[in-house]
Amino acid sequence: MWDKLKLLFSAQKRKNLMDTDFLDPKQKTILIIDDDVPQHDKSSGSKRLFELIKILKTLNLNVIFLPNDGVAIEPYYSDLKNLNVEILLSNPNRNLMLKKLDFLLPFIDYAWISRPSLNKKFQQKIKKNRATRVIFDTVDLHFVRILRQAETEKNEKQKLNGLKTKKNELKLAKCANATVTVTEIEKNILSSENIKNVFVIPNIHEPKYQRNPKDFEQRNGLLFIGGYKHEPNIDAVKWLINDIMPLVWQRLGKIPVYLLGSHPPKEVTDLANDLVFVPGYLENVGGYFENCRLFAAPLRYGAGMKGKIGQSLEYNLPIVTTDIGAEGMDLTDGENILIANETKQFANKIINLYQDPLLWNNIKNNASNAISEYSVEVVKSKLSGLFEYLDQKEL
């Protein structure tokens, strides 16, 4: 009698904990873990993940999403639910969310975990189910970005932090069944550190249709976009406004600059004046890409593939950036982009592009070809290759 009661209680507890009717038994299941539900119009990493989730659904996978903060941020929570994604929330508390995860572990074929901090937190928990293949999505190699920042700022403390991060990231990559980078460059960096099973899954970019595209003469102003929780973007706009643009304004006069992006801190909003506009988060930024004459991204450090560059290419908006900004996208200076790494050189590239309709049109016309490797179909094929490898791999 007691045994029957215990079984009944256990079954009821499981039922209360999680209804698994959303799992189609004919499909494999992937768990995705990130910091929060992807706020796809606020950061490049979130945009990439949201697009990847859409592709995963077309690959006939059950998708479970666990935001580490456990919060149903709208409208992004509803965006995922509309894709038929099951979301684990800290409702009413985080412990229940983690119990739900424990209950679901036997059903999970793949676990896609973003960033080093979340892999450190969740990898071993997920590996309790030995049949689950763990995918470490680096998003960008954090140690590369930190070491580049340390070099730019001549900061020895930051350098030590970068070396510590490198040790951690390499360890996590070795423990995962597969590691994902966004560029071939970062894959090669990991390969040189004897990390195997690395796959390149880049950002997704498709050309934007423009009903009445404006020509060179109809456009005015410079554009930058980036989430300001990401320190390289803060450094970039400060360099742009404080050092580069005074040289440009001296030659070309009163050209407006629009610094778009979410969460601008005081050091960014303080840059605003009668020529510099810092509107903060905007739901629709398409008009800026369609009306500005060029995009400027003076990124001095960073890693991975820069979503802002891909977004500008989607709109065929000519770009001036650095080697860091153009990294990993097979872009060619003078063909589909302009590249400069020093203040005067960067200012001169802006001045030349802003005044020369022939150069401007040449760069513009080559832009759409530059993102052909980042289409939905190409990335879908890369994801299929990743899962085929994991399915064949012995655990």
Image: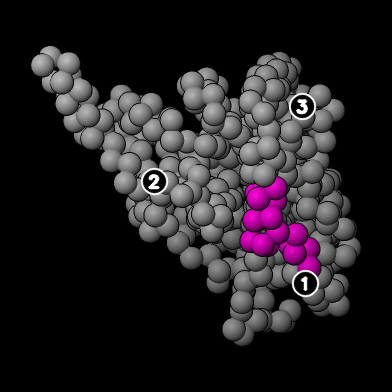
Give the percent coordinates (x, y) of residue 65: 43, 42
Q: Rate crowding at label 1 as few (under 14), some (14 to 19) or many (20 or more) other CA atoms within 10 Å.
A: many
Q: Rate crowding at label 2 as few (under 14), some (14 to 19) or many (20 or more) other CA atoms within 10 Å.
A: some
**Residue bearing the label numbered 2:** 23
Left or right, 101 with reference to 30: left
Q: Of all residues shown, which one is farthest toward the left?
A: 1
Left or right, 133 with reference to 322: left
Residue 320 inside the magenta-drawn segment: no
Residue visible at 64% across and 61% down? 376
Residue 28 seen from this side: yes
- Residue 186, by quadrant, is top right
The amino acid on which the numbered mark 1 sits, given as a three-letter code, is: Lys
Residue visible at 26% across and 30% down? 14
Left or right, 249 with reference to 45: right
Q: Secondary structure at mark 2?
A: loop
Which dot marks residue 195? 3
Foreground residue among 276 and 230: 230
Foreground residue among 240 and 30: 30
Give the percent coordinates (x, y) of residue 143: 70, 27
Residue 381 inside the magenta-drawn segment: yes
Label 2 vs label 1, nearer the camera:
2
